[in-house]
Amino acid sequence: MSSLNLDDFTDLIERPDGGVRRDAEARRERQIVPPGSLGRLDDLGEWLAAAQGVVPVRPVERPRVVLFAGDHGIAELGVSARPAGSAGELVRSVLEGGSPAAVLARRLGVPVRIVDMALDCEPGSLPDEVVKHRVRRGSGRIDIEDALTLEEAEAAFNAGVAVADEEADSGTDLVVLGDVSVGGTTPASVLIAALCGTDASVVTGRGGLAIDDLAWMRKCAAIRDALRRARPVLGDQLQLLATVGGADLAAMTGFLLQSAVRKLPVILDGVVAAACALVGQRVAFRAPDWWLAGQNSGEPGQAKALDRMALEPLLDHGVTVGEGAGALLALPLVQAAAALAAELPLKPEELAEAEGVSAEAEESAEPSVAPEAAAEPERAAGLEKAAEPEKAAGSEQAAEPDQAAEPEAAVSPEKADAPAAAEKPTDA
């Protein structure tokens, strides 16, 4: 019995700030370029502002590519054009800079992080930071056995949660999420068919390196057999990942849910990321509001999953190579949307009105006389008024002796000297 309660994510995950999105829409209407003339770039800028919780939106300056890697036992049936257990070679190609995703990431200046969850190779053949989260060596053959034990599924899920926390804590502001796997599109298609209630033929695609018709038939049969094993455990998402998923898919699901908890936007790449997102939506219905579909890879399972989550791909170039390459192509589009939303100038009348409001706010915020100083004259006036009766009374009392001595006080100094001058004897 697992100690992990996925229902907690329902309470932990909130939607992007709707009030901020309305503010972003209002700001967009005041800009010189008419609203709607930038197409989906308007929606992207508003979505990113809501995810960041700020208007104007901040530029996307610290994106990162995160790739979860693993081998799948179902590849032994010949459902992939690549040899079973060869995902380690793909990982080394990315690390050495020779894969499409590595070239694009280098061109865009985006660091790449690879997380080995179940590669079928010796751990010592890869760097320690790649293999430190590995749960097991290869996932089980899902048509006849479980991909993982429940304990392994929980460990993989928790590893994805830990990676999301590490990215959020390091300052990553947007993640491009992809996978590096051999046989991974088969369990992804099983998960999508199980959660959408469709048949195997509806979700079976050709894979990253296109398979022929015979391999497609084998793949369709493998999905059908695994689907029978998946339906009884549909009510328990962790058990579903253990039964027909894999360590890399369980980790990606945990990563997506924790990224939504940490309000970290994610661009999804192909069918594997879409399948994990669909499982995440079943766990927490608000989680897809934090995700973008980077591209339409052409896989029927991906189209089914994105339709169920109401996510519309940004690009439709049919990139099936995996490794996050298709989603990386959508990253400049998101960055352009953020730049336009933040840097387009306002209309002249809107700018003048904004400056007028700002000036009024400054005047009201900075009074010419301090409140204490302004109150001093009032206090002084009050004291003078209160003292007037006392002054009047005092002046009346002081005036009474003067009135009694009025005859003497009435004589001017000149008149008082006149008798003295008369009495003075003359020389004659």
Image (cartoon, rainbow, N blue to C red):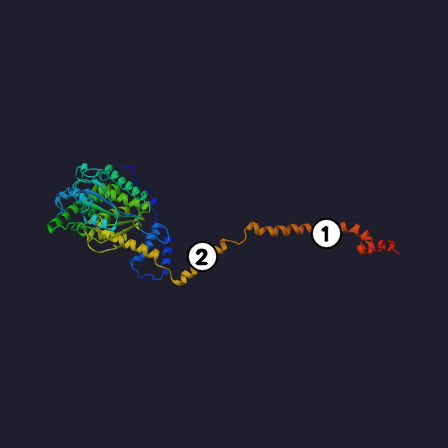
Residue at left offset 65%, top offset 50%: 383
Res 37 quadrant in image: bottom left
Mark 1 closeness class: few <14, some 14–19, many ≥20 residues within 10 Å = few
Give the quadrant of the C terminus. bottom right
Q: Is residue 313 above or below residue 237?
A: below
Q: Nearer the viewer, residue 227 or 169?
A: 169
Task: Report helix, strand or loop for mark 2.
Answer: helix
In the rendered structure, which amino acid carries the disc numbered 1?
Ala
Q: Which mark is residue 358?
A: 2
Q: Which mark is residue 392?
A: 1
In the rendered structure, which amino acid carries the disc numbered 2?
Ser
Q: Position of residue 179 (x, y in %)?
A: 21, 46
Res 120 quadrant in image: top left
Q: Position of residue 15 (x, y in %)?
A: 34, 49
Q: Is residue 89 above or below residue 415?
A: above
Residue placed furthest toward the front: 428
Give the quadrant of the N terminus. top left
